[in-house]
Amino acid sequence: MSERVPEATVVEGQVSQPVVRTPAAQEAAAAKPAPRTGPRWEVEARERVRAAVRRFNKPLVDLVARDANEGDTRLLVTDFLCDGLGYDKYEDLTTEYQVKGEFADYGVRIDKQLLAFIEVKRCTQKLGVKHLRQVQMYAVNEGVEWMILTNGQVWQAWHMTAGLPVVIDLALEVDLLGDGGRAVKGDALFYLSKDAFKRRLIDDLWRAAAATSPKSLANTVLAESVVEAIRKELRRQTGYNAGSQELEKILRSDVLQNGLAQ
């Protein structure tokens, strides 16, 4: 999220000597985010999320250090949703949303429309498949596309496409205490902000992630035209004229791992 960022300045009428930077300075300059451009609402939303990532870093580190319980984690998540992502605690967030006798931690409403469920786990609990299945059950029953899993540190956004079976794609994953600059993490979490979410910007992120997922790429490799192109290239390189069915079998069983291809 599995998980969706460097120029010379020319001053008219002046000629100046090139500036030689040390490797450390070059690295720092490369890491500096480019100036924000775009609509005012987007610039402000990105800056708000980035500021929240910085502000909540210490409280999050403290939570993890003392292995805080799920209730304390939920308090931090609520504050981050409101102060960082721009949701109104009373208008946009519905806590303990009941779904057929079970309760999702949050339902997210924008303009009175239910768009997502959020499931919160203890800050030191690793997010896993069972947690995804839990929030997926809520989404299936309520016809909701988006599911967000978080333990305060890691944020995952999953998209569900209805069908038999349903298709689940990871559109976004951000680790607030992981590698990478806080500005980069803030820009990633921007897609979960109310401002971006109501404009469905995360849909483009999901489509790109789904199109380039291992499963999607594996199925592309097994397409008839691709297998035929591989057969011809193999014959050109080795002189061996393999059959298309033979190649597909080898690709499926030996090259593509972990059952990615259907």
Image (cartoon, rainbow, N blue to C red):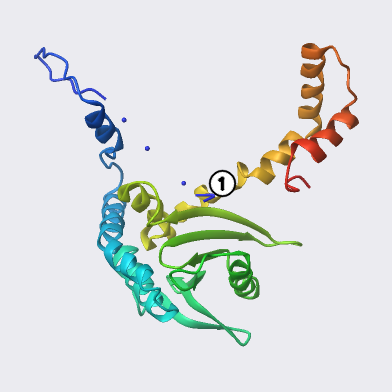
Pointer 1: what residue? 209
Label 1 neighbourhood size at 10 Å, few (<14), some (14-19), many (20+)?
many
The three-letter code of the residue at mark 1 reads Ala
Camera sees residue 245: yes
Pinpoint residue 80: horizontal percent, then vertical percent: 33, 68
Please tell me which residue lies in front, 59 or 74.
Answer: 59
Q: Is residue 137 above or below residue 159?
A: below
Q: Is residue 103 left or right of residue 10?
A: right
Pinpoint residue 208: horizontal percent, then vertical percent: 55, 44
Pinpoint residue 57: horizontal percent, then vertical percent: 30, 61
Q: Is residue 56 left or right of residue 2?
A: left
| Residue at figure coordinates x 51%, y 48% from the top left | 204
Q: Secondary structure at mark 1?
A: helix
Q: Is residue 124 left or right of residue 184?
A: right
Please tell me which residue lies in front, 7 or 94.
Answer: 7
Q: Is residue 246 left or right of residue 132?
A: right
